[in-house]
Structures are given as structure tokens and as C-alpha cells.
């Protein structure tokens, strides 16, 4: 299996970094091929715009989706996007590794989605959700939170975690046809004990080894 890890944390020594390193180690040892897009290390530009293209269909007025379609048809995406798109085409599974910030993705990771999930390349008119362009590929969120698990229950102050992540799992991943696996979540990772973090890493190892038999979420 080819696995792409899109990793978004600015500190290599963070627990997110430990999760990413664990994924690379476990998946590689299990015989899978792994690539990592370390967005902060790459200094990936989160702002989509005219710089996404080496030529424009209409230089007089910028229409993002129109330019994305033109670039897909003519091979004129900026090199950094062409590289990431090639990784996505290569991957059987895409793991998004990040800390949950403001109930969503860090800006640098949202920018990766904005720019790489381009119209024409990853979706098109009438080609989304059940008819999406990547039905044979899978995706999975791996994330940490600041608050404990009890805060993300239906009665918790932050609401049901399924609902919190729905705009990502359904609105971004399933939207382009990906089969979305249940997320792995390390709750309150910065505040729990070292023993708790070790338990998280052990549970993550077990989850990684069971990826091929894990069924997708249903929306």
C-alpha cells in the first residue's frame, strides 16, 4: 500500500511529530511505501491564488475554479502543486496529521486542501461524493486536541466529535470521493501524563496495523 502523510505541525518534537514518526516506522516495517509532506518544513504556501499557475487562461480577471480547470487540462499548475498532486495520485491512503485548531485544520493544511484539491483534478461538475474522482483511495485524520475526550461528547461543551470533524471528513475528503476511515484522536495530548501519551502511541500502532481491514465511515 502507498501511504501519503500530510503533516502539519511546526514543532518536530511535538506529540504530533511523535505520531507522524510512529506512522512512518510502523507502516514501513509492515512493508508499505510511505511519503511525507511536512508542510511547515516545506514552507508550503497556504494562500491559493494566481501563483498556483504558471500561465493563466484569463489574465484580466482571476476566477480560481476556471483557472484550476485550465491548468489541469494544460499541465500548467505551479511546480509545488504538481508535486503534491502526483503524490495524491500515487497514494492508496492519505493520512492527515495535525493538531485541531479552532475546531478545524491548521491554516497551512487547509491551504494544502484548497490548492491541491483543485477543480478538474480532484472534483468536477457532477463528480463529487459517491461519484467522486477518487473512489478507490482512502483517507484518515490523525489529530490531537487541547480538550479532553469528555468535552467532545454529545453532552460535552465542544459538541460531538463526529459533528466537529464532519466539515473535514465529508466536506473535503468524501467530497472528492475518498473512502474516509474513522479518525485516530489523541485527546488533550499536551496535558496528559507521559504514560498516557505512551498508551496513545501504542494504540496508534495497533490502529496502523489494522488499516487494511478497517471499514470506512458512512455519511
Image (cartoon, grey):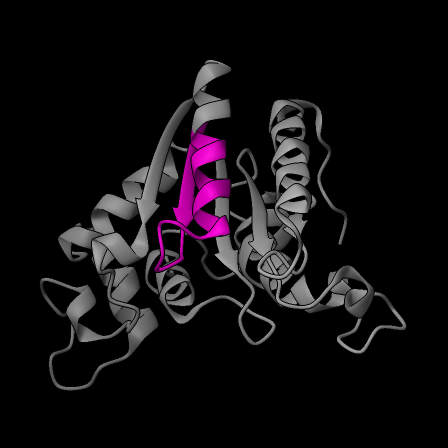
Q: Is residue 141 visible?
A: yes
Q: Which of the 4 quarters of the picture holds residue 209?
A: top right
Q: Give coordinates of residue 28: x percent, y percent.
A: 43, 20
Residue 106 in the image: above or below residue 16: below
- Quarter of the image with the C terminus in it: bottom right
Residue found farthest to the bottom: 61
* Residue 21 part of the magenta segment: yes
* Residue 199 part of the magenta segment: no
Q: In the image, what residue occupies the spot 60% across and 52% down?
A: 174
* Residue segment shown in magenta: 1-24
Q: Give coordinates of residue 56: x percent, y percent.
A: 13, 70
Between residues 85 and 40, which one lies in front from this camera angle? Answer: 40
Q: In the image, what residue occupies the spot 32% across and 45% down?
A: 37
Q: Give coordinates of residue 127: x percent, y percent.
A: 53, 54
Q: In the image, what residue occupies the spot 66% across and 63% down?
A: 165
Residue 142 in the image: above or below residue 93: below
Residue 175 in the image: above or below residue 6: below
Residue found farthest to the right: 155
Residue 94 in the image: above or below residue 98: above
Q: Which of the 4 quarters of the picture holds residue 175?
A: bottom right
Q: Is residue 181 visible?
A: no
Q: In the image, what residue occupies the spot 32% across and 63% down?
A: 115
Amino acid at each position: 500500500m502507498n501511504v501519503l502523510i500530510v503533516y502539519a505541525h511546526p514543532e518536530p518534537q511535538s506529540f504530533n511529530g511523535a505520531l507522524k514518526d510512529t506512522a512512518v516506522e510502523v507502516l514501513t516495517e509492515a512493508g508499505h511505501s510511505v511519503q511525507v509532506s511536512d508542510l511547515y518544513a516545506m514552507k508550503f504556501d497556504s494562500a491559493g491564488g494566481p501563483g498556483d499557475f504558471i500561465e493563466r487562461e484569463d489574465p484580466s480577471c482571476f476566477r480560481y475554479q476556471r483557472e484550476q480547470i485550465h491548468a489541469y487540462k494544460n499541465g500548467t499548475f505551479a511546480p509545488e502543486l504538481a508535486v503534491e498532486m502526483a503524490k495524491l495520485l500515487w497514494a492508496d491512503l492519505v493520512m492527515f496529521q495535525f493538531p485541531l485548531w479552532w475546531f478545524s485544520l491548521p491554516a497551512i493544511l487547509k491551504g494544502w486542501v484548497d490548492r491541491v484539491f483543485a477543480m478538474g483534478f480532484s472534483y468536477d461538475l457532477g463528480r463529487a461524493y459517491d461519484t467522486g474522482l477518487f473512489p478507490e483511495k482512502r483517507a484518515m485524520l490523525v489529530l490531537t486536541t487541547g480538550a479532553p475526550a469528555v468535552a467532545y461528547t454529545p453532552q460535552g461543551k465542544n459538541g460531538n466529535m463526529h459533528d466537529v470533524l464532519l466539515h473535514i471528513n465529508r466536506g473535503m475528503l468524501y467530497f472528492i470521493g475518498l473512502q474516509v476511515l474513522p479518525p485516530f484522536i489523541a485527546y488533550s495530548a499536551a496535558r496528559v501524563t507521559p504514560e498516557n501519551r505512551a498508551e496513545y502511541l501504542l494504540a496508534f500502532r495497533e490502529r496502523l496495523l489494522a488499516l487494511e481491514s478497517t471499514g470506512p465511515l458512512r455519511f
